[in-house]
Image (cartoon, rainbow, N blue to C red):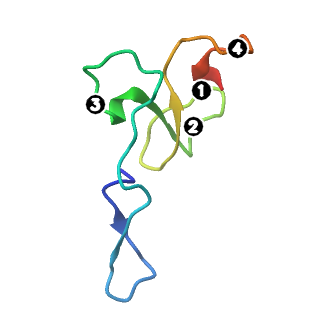
Amino acid sequence: MLADGVVDEKSANKQMIYFLRRLPRDPFALDANLSNGATWGKRSHASPDDNPSEGDDIFDVYSRSKLIGLNGVALNKW
């Protein structure tokens, strides 16, 4: 996960690099029992735009909420 860090392949001594300090909670997640990471849908680079799915190369997250935005579109479709 991005908060755990990855080895910097460009570093001579293979230092870790971090992209997030922590994964924030989806503010629209209603289930308080879910961990922060479980509140988000995760998208792999290999998955199509219209059908995101997890994989080894997660590069995007999206809300899993079915709430409807002011524009009439469900938040999980933004």
Q: Earlier in the sequence, mark 1 or mark 4?
A: 1
**Is mark 2 in CB contact (under 8 Å) with mark 1?**
yes
Q: Secondary structure at mark 1?
A: loop
Q: Which residue is mark 2?
A: 47
Q: Is residue 64 left or right of residue 30?
A: right
Q: Amino acid at mark 2?
A: Ser
Q: Earlier in the sequence, mark 1 or mark 3?
A: 3
Dots 1, 4 in contact, CB < 8 A = no
Q: Looking at the picture, which amino acid does disc 1 mark?
A: Asn
For residue 34, what is the image quadrant? top left
**Picture disc at residue 35:** 3
Residue 51 to residue 56: above or below: above
The residue identified by callout 4 is: 70
Q: CA distance from mark 3 to mark 2?
A: 24 Å
Sequence order check, earlier mark of 2 and 4: 2
Counting from the top left corner in percent of width and height, residue 72 is at 72, 10
Q: What crowding class fits label 3: few (fewer than 14 Cα within 10 Å), some (14-19), or many (20 or more)?
A: few
Q: Is 63 located above or below residue 73 in the figure?
A: below
Mark closer to the chain start, 3 or 2: 3
Residue 14 position within the rendered picture, expressed as x and y whole percent measured from the top left: 33, 80
Given the image, on which type of amino acid does mark 4 rest? Leu
Separation of residues labelled 2 and 1 (CA atoms): 7 Å
Q: Which mark is residue 8?
A: none
Residue 24 screen position, x and y as percent: 40, 40
Marks 2 and 4, how far apart at CA: 28 Å
Question: For this rendering, which residue is in front, 62 or 52?
Answer: 62
14 displayed left or right of 75? left
Marks 4 and 3: CB-CB under 8 Å?
Answer: no
State how far apart marks 4 and 3 are (Cα): 27 Å
Q: Circle 1 sits on which residue?
A: 51
* Residue situated in front as seen by the camera: 66 or 12: 66
